Amino acid sequence: MQTPFDNIGLIGKPQHQGANESLKALYRFLKAKGKRILVEERVAKELELDDLEVMDLVAIGQHADLAIVVGGDGNMLGAARVLSRFNVGVVGVNRGNLGFLTDIHPDDVERQLEGIFSGDYATEQRFLLEVEVYRHNQLKSSNAAVNEAVLHHGKVAHMMEFEVHIDDQFVFSQRSDGLIVATPTGSTAYSLSGGGPILTPNLDALTLVPMFPHTLSSRPIVVDANSVVRLVVSHDNTEALQVSCDGHVVLSVLPGDEIQIRKNPYTLRLIHPRSYNYFNVLRTKLGWGSKLY
């Protein structure tokens, strides 16, 4: 039996006209359904309504059964890194561009949510990455990533040197603009732009995609997601580098540092309308051809 959703977190894209319209319509709809509505702090400022139950993302994760994220994939990623720690269900209403993670169309919100509230939905678990930066064997910083962790230079078109190890086995050394380590969720994001493969969400795998490598033989590689990927930055690099998590969180890296990337202990619990089909999403978002007959 599907879990009922009675406590609903409302999360959105601030100062975006389309998102605000959807948020206000959602609030009215949820109020009419008798749901307890937990409104994210930034959303509360835009709704301009009285008697709102306002919370930050951590509190929403602690109290909500379902979080509705209105915006683009970037909004979903930011919320997911926090909400994944609480196993709260998350559903996205697309008010962005591509919308690989926010799969409900804003014109069809009420019908789709009616189905979800009645128990007609599909649940999908997506794993995250845990990204750690070590300096002289001491942990200096860490964060989570839903899509990818990217080792890169702070400057555009600037090469670096580093080694890649997987489960303590040396794989290769490389001179390039950096490396993308992506989850199946992130395989349709920055990794795809870098020439990486698309991994279906049910795969327990990671893809490593070199960024503009200084050799034609360097190619993306897919590895077991339970591996520990270790990037050792060469002392020969003369400037500081960075590791970006989902393009949002930036961790500083110095020459000689080591970055460890592994599965995060938490997973993102995505809620989809029953009609959700991953390959339909790919066809729609990437402009693939439909059936001939």
Image (cartoon, helix red, strand yellow):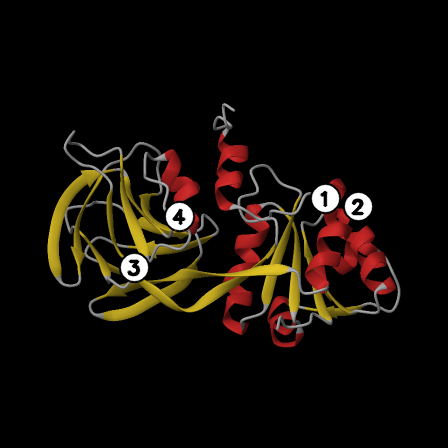
Residue 198 got which mark? none
Q: Residue furthest bottom?
A: 62
Q: Answer with mark 1 or mark 4, whichever residue precedes in sequence.
A: 1
Dots 4 and 2: beta carbons under 8 Å? no
Q: CA distance from mark 4 to mark 2?
A: 33 Å
Identity of the residue drawn at 83% across and 57% down = 29
The answer to whether 272 is drawn above or below residue 72 in the figure is below
The answer to whether 82 is drawn above or below residue 206 in the figure is below
Horizontal arrangement in the rendering, residue 152 relative to residue 147 (left or right): left
Residue identifier under label 2: 21
Identity of the residue drawn at 39% across and 50% down = 184
What amino acid type is highlighted by mark number 4? Thr
Residue identifier under label 3: 225
Residue identifier under label 4: 200
Q: Quadrant of residue 121?
A: bottom right
Closer to the camera: disc 1 or disc 4?
4
Q: CA distance from mark 1 to mark 4?
A: 25 Å
Q: Answer with mark 2 or mark 1, whichever residue precedes in sequence.
A: 2
Q: CA distance from mark 3 to mark 1?
A: 34 Å
Closer to the camera: disc 4 or disc 2?
4
Secondary element at image label 1: helix
Secondary element at image label 3: loop
Dots 3 and 1: beta carbons under 8 Å? no
- Which of 64/20 is in front? 64
Q: CA distance from mark 3 to mark 4?
A: 13 Å
Q: Quadrant of residue 265?
A: bottom left
